[in-house]
Image: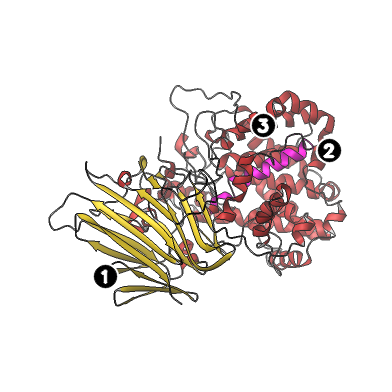
Amino acid sequence: MPNRSQTETSPDAPEDAFSRVSAHTAPPAGAEPVATAFDGPLFRHWGDGMREPALRSAFRAAGADGLRRRSGIPSSGDREVWDAVDPFTIEQLRIDAEAGLGRPWPDVTASLFARYARDGDREHYEAAVYARQERLTRAVLLAAVTREARWVDEAADGAIVLCEQSTWSLSAHDDAHARRGFVVPDAASPYVDLWAGEIVAQLAVADRVLGEEWERSWPGVRERLRHEAELRVFAPFETRDDFWWLGYWREVNNWNPWILGNVLLAAVLLLEDPERVARLTARALDSLDRYVATLPADGAIDEGVAYWWNGAGRMLELLALVSQLTDGALDAASLPLIAEVLRFPMRMQLGDDWYVNVADGWARSRGGEPWQLPFRWGRRTGDARVADWASGGRRPGTPVAPVKGGLPRFVRAVADPEWRDAVPAAPPLPRSVWLPSVQLLVRRGHVGDASGLTLAAKGGSNDENHNHKDLGSFIVAAGGRPLLVDVGKPTYTRQTFSPERYGIRAMQSGWHNAPAPRGLEQGEGPAFSARVLTAPAGEPGAAEADGDAFALDLTGAYPLAAGEEWTRAFRFDAGRIEVTDSWRLRPEADVPAAVLHVVAAGEVRVDGDRVLVTADGAGIAIAAEGIIPSLEEWRLDDPELSGVWGERLTRLRYRLPQAEGSITMTVEELR
């Protein structure tokens, strides 16, 4: 089995997904995946109500039209919705859409598709696909609001363009190359990946919104959409058990709820047989239960906040849809696990748009998150802190949702008057968060206050989703702005999810704020992990505990010899952060016993025996018992990284000559 980092799943909707298994992974030789019933958290909550017989009875009574109404996706005839859409949102859509009106739709060529197999490039193909979808989303929204023929026609053009696309799967996910050696898609065997789900849901929502308009002016378009959806998605989903993301033979990740939610929404909107929709719903819920079963009780997502939106967030969207379709009979809002998962990204906020980032996540919000999703769930569950946190994404003078988030999410946002009228509230910023499942502590001086220092420190294992070798690493922010940082996600290539993954600098422990005993990199896989020696004080397992000390045994993170050891302890004390490393290693001639690495973002300069780091008006001073580090600059030429950190990052290297010893690094705020 590949390391979990060598697999695919995505943070931001036009980016794609990273998971524990490759999109090209096949079932074990001789194995025959079978869809057997799974008794997970959802089944224990709902019982046989989630199985096909009960759903068939309920959906038959509702009828196909009733299910479509319950979906929450309005048709263009629902003028109460479309006449009340936020004016700024529509004006921005109009400006962007008119810039491309009348021009050819972006080409999605075979040469672009083949580049992934040939040279590892996936960005150019994906950019062309995303540009098509974003143009269609704008057209559908404008057609629904204005009913102008030019936008109805533009939307019909975009829908047919997608129907004529050779595959709905992304080149990095399609299995034609791995299975048959093709560098083009295999039209005879459509692969259902994240983007097949995204496209079928987009076309289904477009059909729901503009169906009445298309019936009058574009007869035949709706039939074409249904034909392609059946061939490319519904039939494969219904008949094939070998898709790994279903969970019948492999552990699942964020692909599972992301694909299931899109497929089910499309089925509800496009299919006329309620009993078939019930069958597909039962299959989706049985599969989703396998994903829910992987989530820890404290709600932590090991891929971090960036992936929450397209993992746990997709799960919440699917659960909300199921509640609507069953008229509240199947509602997961009261499950404690769901409440904890909902709170996770709120708990990771450092300040403003900066977040604790781990694995392949970004440290800074990219502005494309579907904030209406946690806002609505916070209101639904009565969690005022989540609603307040999410309301920060509803900024005056900006659209209610990002186009790149996809048409279903955009329509849900524009159809929500509470979200349209939401006013940003002060962020909750919990004082202390402890997530034992991933061994992650976040600690700041005061509740609801980003001023001063914030510490985030983690243990965990090197078998996490989208894993970076970051055991024992930490982040320090001043005034909510991270200055000692986790580098985060670079641009994806074929190398990213391959055995050469850890050749990428951003994934290496040497470029995290971690020690390097005898210059070693951390090991990869489940055998390499941290062990908690001292957990933050508070109720065991509490997600928000109160404590200032956290200690880890990092011996198991490295391929050390017998008898060697390394521990790291963190202490937060009145705005001063202390990181104490203690070690015992085998001495080696002419080789430093160890190196401490610290990666800083901003202006870095040595001032006596301290190092000063400043950025955006925030600053810290770092001291390590008189040791002066060497500074190594990393000039960032990757747009994914430079978009977060600017032109460069600086690595501080503290050489430790003794084979046995202890050292305390202190971080204090510059005032």
- Secondary structure mainly formed by the magenta segment: helix
Which one is earlier in the sequence, the residue at label 1 or at label 2?
2
Q: Secondary structure at mark 1?
A: loop
**Residue tagged by mark 2?**
65
Closer to viewer: mark 1 or mark 2: 1
Q: Amino acid at mark 3?
A: His
Q: In the rendering, at what x and y percent does residue 492 appear?
A: 46, 53
Quadrant of the rendered structure where residue 224 is? top right
Gap between marks 3 and 1, in whole Å? Answer: 58 Å
Find out whether residue 86 is within the magenta segment: no
- Say which of 46 and 385 sits in front: 385
Highlighted magenta segment, given as a residue range:
306-330
Q: Residue 45: which disc?
A: 3
Which one is earlier in the sequence, the residue at label 2 or at label 3?
3
Quarter holding the N terminus is top left
Quadrant of the rendered structure where residue 284 is? top right
Task: Give yes or no for contact between labels 3 and 1 (Cβ–Cβ under 8 Å).
Answer: no
Mark 2 residue crowding within 10 angstroms, few (<14) / some (14–19) / many (20+): some
Q: Residue 626: which disc?
A: 1
Q: Is residue 550 above or below residue 623?
A: above
